[in-house]
Image: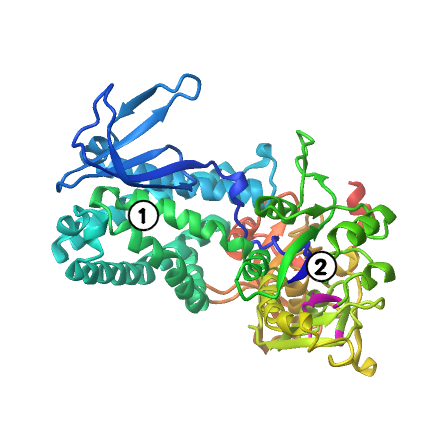
Amino acid sequence: MKRLVTLPLYLAANVNAFAPSSLRPRTSLQISRSESSDLQEGTDTKQENKFAFDVPSLTSFEFNPKGSTDLDESIIASNASDGAATTWSYGEFAKAYPNVNNIGIATIKTASADLLAQVVIAQTPISDIDWQRAFLFCAFGALYLGAFQYWYQVNIFKKLFDVDKFTSQPWGDKLKDREGLVSLGAQTAVDLTVLTLIYLPTFYIFKAGVFSGSTDPSMWVSQGIENYSTNFAKDEFDLIRVWAPADLVCFSVPLYLRLPVRHVVSFVWTANAALDMIMAIYTKSLEPTSPYKVVGVVTQPNKRRKKRSGEILPTPVGIVAEELGIPILCPENARDKDFLDELEASVKPDLCITAAYGQYLTKRFLALPKFGTLNIHPSLLPRWRGSSPVQRSLEAGDNPVGVSVLFTVSAMDAGPIVSQKSVEIDENEQATTLLPKLFEVGTDLLLDVMPSVVSGKITMETATQQDDELVVDAKMIDASEGRLKPESMTARECHNRIRGFSMWPGTYVYLQMGDGEPIKVKIVESRVLDETMEVTDIIKAGPKKSDGLRLICYDGSVLEVLQVQPATKKVMDHRSFANGLQGRSLRWLKDVDEDAIKLK
């Protein structure tokens, strides 16, 4: 069994990231079969076939399916201090007020998911939370996930399928009910169809309304449908992976409990999706045939991540490693003697893996693992060696882009290549979304080659050496590069820089409204039109309602601006920005003294 150490600073940083279970409230969901038909105060109730598992929730549910066709569901609220318990009939409440029950749970789920995204993933201080956005998610959860879903399940499922007969059976009998299991599969298929044709487009339209900054509903619809079409294949895969298992569980319980159960299951399932990369390596190591196990994680030291409270928190990777029970090392500097001594004497890795660790690894470190150190690098090496490979590849207009798994050597990104894969991308793909995709591909490549590396089949000597004549440096980005200069850059060059610098530092131009002072405006999203126009510094909207603002560069090429963010304001779509002009002209500026503007 080979010993593996990972240094994956990036592995848990996917936007598209959810909170680990250590940050989620945990309660016990107990499912038991009881011989007694009633729970009576002061009476011991004999139970059989009892099992329990933990789920994130707000309360502790106890379901007690009986031998009869009736179900008695009750919430047991335990008093931790004296062991006393009080009973509240959740089953009666759910039966009497199914709409209230489902709307409440759906609202809590969507609001919690958004708050987790803001506070845990984006690390937004409590004082800066966007409560308007959180309220909109509450509304979406109440109207669609709570009200509409319950309505169509009552009015469609109960008419098409014998819901009560199957769900009222004991769990053992359900598995023997062939007709009921076929019905269960049919309900899941119908629900996935509704999710595909109604839920997804509705969600994307809702999302456009929340994040576009536009007040025009037609803009929400057009942008939402466009995003729905673009992400269709990926979303269908996620529906099968996430919702199908949730449906199989929730469609096995009584109708009035279906949505509560589904919201719990789907929330648990998707909460782990953001940890795919680090979890993939760890999960693979648990397989009986795995030739390695994870013995440690090296990540950056804990930092002050909450501005107001000054609370010191570990990195996302540190949180995940702690949750999995993996030893963690957090050296201030990877050159520290104490860190290297501990790595050599206690951890004793056979193989190390790095992914955007951000620190220089010394020769002593690289000499410790006998099978070497592997690195996931998001470019097609030797093109784009350096600190900003994705940003520079997008800025250059590369397509395809790619990812490489290579041995780490003292020279930056110069080691022999173990595996490499090209990835075709859309011409409007931005670094914000591309980087996590490439690391996901890189993780798959890594898992494929690791057995060959730890067996000695792939070594430094047998891996593919890089051609130094083909090296292109991905130099570190300077904030000053974020300024777009239409007087000397083509629309394509501006667009590619917008895509490449979407994470940091962003791209901007200086604009003038009428006779006003110059204002700094960040361009968030754009596209290049396949036409040329007469050169001018005046910016106007296109003739169609869906057209963006047209910025004409020095060569007549046209950059269509779709989303902007004026200084001190939120991101907004082009139409909302144009509405703020109130008839004034808009032009881009060439000669601007940035230092003078900063002093004002």
Query: Which range is magenta?
Result: 371-383
Task: Identify the residue at image location x=22%, y=58%.
Answer: 184
- Point out residue 489 in the picture as x, y percentages from the top left corner: 73, 70
Three-letter code, disc 2: Ala
Disc nearer the start of the sequence (1/2): 1
Secondary element type, mark 2: loop
- Point out residue 102 in the picture as x, y percentages from the top left corner: 28, 40
Residue placed most toward the observer, 263 or 477? 263
Nearer to us: label 1 or label 2: 2
Task: Identify the residue at image location x=59%, y=47%.
Answer: 320
Read off the residue under disc 2: 356
Alpha-carbon span between mark 1 and mark 2:
40 Å
Examine the structure image and report whether residue 374 is included in the region drawn in magenta: yes
Read off the residue under disc 1: 144
Three-letter code, disc 1: Tyr
Examine the structure image and report whether residue 139 is included in the region drawn in magenta: no
Please indicate whether residue 20 sits to the left or right of residue 100 in the image. Answer: right
The answer to whether mark 1 and mark 2 are in CB contact below 8 A is: no
Does the rendering let one see residue 381? no
- Point out residue 342 in the picture as x, y percentages from the top left corner: 79, 48
- Point out residue 486 in the picture as x, y percentages from the top left corner: 71, 67
Q: Is residue 313 above or below residue 272?
A: above
Q: Is residue 550 above or below residue 344?
A: below
Does the rendering let one see residue 324? yes
Secondary element type, mark 1: helix
Report which quarter residue 467 is drawn in.
bottom right
Task: Identify the residue at image location x=68%, y=50%.
Answer: 515
Residue placed most toward the observer, 109 or 56? 56
Q: Quadrant of the C terminus?
A: top right
